[in-house]
Image (cartoon, rainbow, N blue to C red):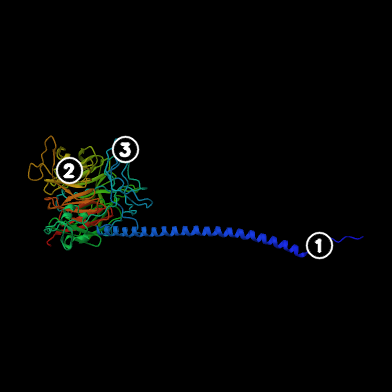
Amino acid sequence: MYQPHRPQQPPTTRLGELLEQVKAEFDAQASRSNDYDHQIAGQIHEMELVRGKIYQLEQTHLAMKNKYEEELARLRHELEQRGGPSQGPHAGPAQPPPPAIGHGPANLFQGIMAGAGGQGGPGLAPPPQEQPGQPGMPGHMQAQGPPSLNQPPGPPHNPFAYPQPQGPGINGYGPGAPQPTASPGPGKPRVGPPRLGGPATPQQTQVNPYPGSPSIARPTPPPNQNQQIAPDFQYTHAQLEQIGNQLSELEPDKLPPHLKRQGDDWHAVFNPRVHRRLDVDLVHNLAHQSVVCCVRFSHDGRFVATGCNRSAQIFDVNTGKQVCHLQDHQTTQDGDLYIRSVCFSPDGRYLATGAEDKIIRVWDIANKQIRHSFAGHEQDIYSLDFASDGRYIASGSGDRTIRLWDIQENQCVLTLQIEDGVTTVAMSPDGRFVAAGSLDKSVRIWDTSTGVLVERTEGEQGHKDSVYSVAFAPNGQHLVSGSLDKTIRMWKLNNTRSFGGMQTGPHPKNGECVRTFEGHKDFVLSVALTPDGQWVMSGSKDRGVQFWDPETGHAQLMLQGHKNSVISVAPSPMGTLFATGSGDMKARIWRYTGYNGP
């Protein structure tokens, strides 16, 4: 059968169609590619803009960083010049702050050891919260994030052979009562139940150190008071008048050589506005493992005692070596237990210590044993002082009482009650009177034989804040007090006889303030007089020690040798030496001598 042949399309036509399809698909891909190219170009442009902005931000950041680093370097240099810590930008934890004084009712020196976060070591705690019905205690000195404290040092290898009694001595000067001192830090519970009102454990904010302030003869200023006094003296007369006794404002680099003194880690500046009469030098640096709350010399000047966490220590003044370590191992080992006050008996055989556990311990130094233990205070004991006959000890506590203890009878023979926490006590040189400073801004003086209040300093002439330290003058006719109002005041006592007698009528007399010493930039924590009565010395939260002329009220020198608050100052009864205790875990022995230079 014949099948008709279907016509076939020419091969060229089929190929053309396929090529057209390929071309159309290529054009579509090319169009999409162009779109992608445009998108990529746009994104690249955006990235370039972002990169440019990031570069600008980076340059701005570097400029700001350089500016801040230059400012930090300048401030660090200034701090080092003023005696502060010379730590680099990546230095370790700061030194433990000195005991703080808190405004809460809990305890007078509460919070000194509240550690910096996570460091586990004592720091300065914030002021305790107010509790109704309890006396308020000053709470100052913010924490500096001090390093953790180690355990108290063990007993020294050298046995301590103390000399035989050499007769009573005057204990009226250099009370060195432990000013606001340390308290337990976080995670370290206090020993004993909570307290009512006592000196809060001192805390410290970092403060710029106080330059020294011994005075030196001031050259006659030129007619134009805006000119420099001398080529090497970069202060004008007007600037010096404005600085006055605030010797911390003086920059050592701007002072001539005869108005400053420098050691490896300390310096002193002398007041250019008065004639320089003193020189000062470091004798010994006594390292501790916790805050040094108090320092005190023996009456023969051969030894100095310190109080810190759980122990009192005695050092040989000549060698600087520890010769005795006193610690009551019968107490619980939980938490901190700071020794707030130490005091030698006049014959040098005993050392009395007052602590946070409310117990007064009288140690037989040669045997390192407790000879007497006095209980009765209901709160921390902040201050002790032996009477000059060695028989009685005065104590002051946050429980608002001053007590007089008879060592021979082994009992309390007098209790004096006031309205607020007692921060400091001092016995008069003849042992007839006891003075006490309080959180209520007053200084009170009682006749110890009758318990009659014979004098009280308050009112317009009185301090404007809590009194943290008192000390009788060696002649018994004057008393000095240091306060949180940053001043020291000297009081003339109402005398009826030439040596220390005061009126004891039915109504207490208001003391006459004969001198106010102003110049410290922060709380005054400790005051004392040299045994010749020619100088008043003071230690402050501003880290400085100042010597003052009691006749004029002028600061003679300002010594900067500690990296934290100076909690306690004490002169040697033999003269020429004094000791300081600080929150930087150091006690230091210094020498002061007459100056005969320009």
Q: Position of residue 311 (x, y in %)?
A: 28, 51
Q: Mark 1, residues whose alpha carbon is within 10 Å: few (<14), some, or many (≥20)? A: few
Residue that mark 1 sits on:
8
For residue 15, say whether it is visible.
yes
Task: State the quadrant of the C terminus.
Answer: bottom left
Rendered location of residue 5, percent (x, y): 86, 61
Q: Earlier in the sequence, mark 2 or mark 3?
A: 3
Query: Mark 3 packing: few (<14 Cα in 10 Å), some, or many (20+)?
Result: few
Mark 1: secondary structure: loop
- Marks 1 and 2, how far apart at CA: 134 Å
User: Which residue does the numbered mark 2 point to in the structure image?
Assistant: 435
* Secondary structure beneath label 3: loop
Quadrant where the image shows the N terminus = bottom right
Seen from the viewer's position, the closer of residues 336 and 185 is 185
Of residue 476 and residue 117, the one placed in the foreground of this image is 117
Find disc 3 in the rendering and name its residue: 131
At label 2, the amino acid type is Ala
User: Residue 81 lies in what quarter of the image?
Assistant: bottom left
Q: Secondary structure at mark 2?
A: strand
* Side of 527 where 379 appears, left or right: right
Q: Amino acid at mark 3?
A: Gln
Q: Is residue 382 left or right of residue 215?
A: right
Point out the tag, 1 or 2, that comes first from the N-terminus: 1
Most foreground residue, 563 or 32: 32
Residue 282, above or below 478: below
